[in-house]
Amino acid sequence: WDWQYCTQRLPQETYFNLTGGRDMFWRFNKSAATIATHCTRRFPGVVQRPGWIAATSAFSSAGSASHIIFSNGEYDPWRSGGVLRNLSSTLVAIEVPQGAHHLDLMFSNADDPEPVRAARRAELALVREWVAQPLPRSLFY
């Protein structure tokens, strides 16, 4: 994880400090400078690319991608950087009330809340719909 964090971190990853008093983490004051120093020490010579994912994943433009489901769990700490609304008919955001990080992608469990089960059904229906569609001929030429 540290390698990915140092080379591809997301912009929202430096928004919040970890105080150790009002959260469940050890104290760690994050800043761009602190993170750059850590990454330079940990991986000497490696190019750091803060914001690289945001810069190369232009999901604000529906023409840049297709057939992606963005699931967002209500309790997912990554939600702040998620795609929270549909960008097109094939760039679909699914809200997962009572969901956590990747809960809808895990194996089913008898204790799963109904909203998580509903999200799984919606995701499966979209994938089945998309897989049933013929590929555009332009992909073969």
Image (cartoon, helix red, strand yellow):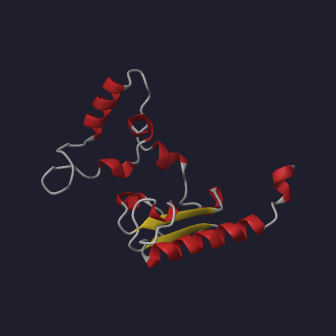
The image shows residue 36, relative to residue 25, as above or below, that is above
The image shows residue 57, relative to residue 46, as above or below, that is below
Q: Residue at x 48, y 63 (%)?
A: 83
Residue lying farthest front?
Answer: 110
Q: Position of residue 6 (x, y in %)?
A: 39, 35
Q: In front: 74, or 7?
A: 74
How many numbered callouts?
0
Q: Residue at x 71, y 67 (%)?
A: 130
Image quarter of residue 112 = bottom left
Q: In front: 109, or 85?
A: 109
Q: Position of residue 47 (x, y in %)?
A: 44, 28
The image shows residue 107, relative to residue 54, as above or below, that is below
Residue lying farthest top?
Answer: 45
Judged left or right of residue 59, residue 30 is left
Q: Residue at x 53, y 60 (%)?
A: 60
Image quarter of residue 103 = bottom left
Q: Position of residue 92 (x, y in %)?
A: 57, 68
Judged left or right of residue 59, residue 131 is right
Q: Residue at x 62, y 69 (%)?
A: 124
Judged left or right of residue 139, residue 118 is left
Can residue 14 be seen by looking at this rendering? yes
Q: Position of residue 7 (x, y in %)?
A: 44, 35
Residue lying farthest left?
Answer: 21
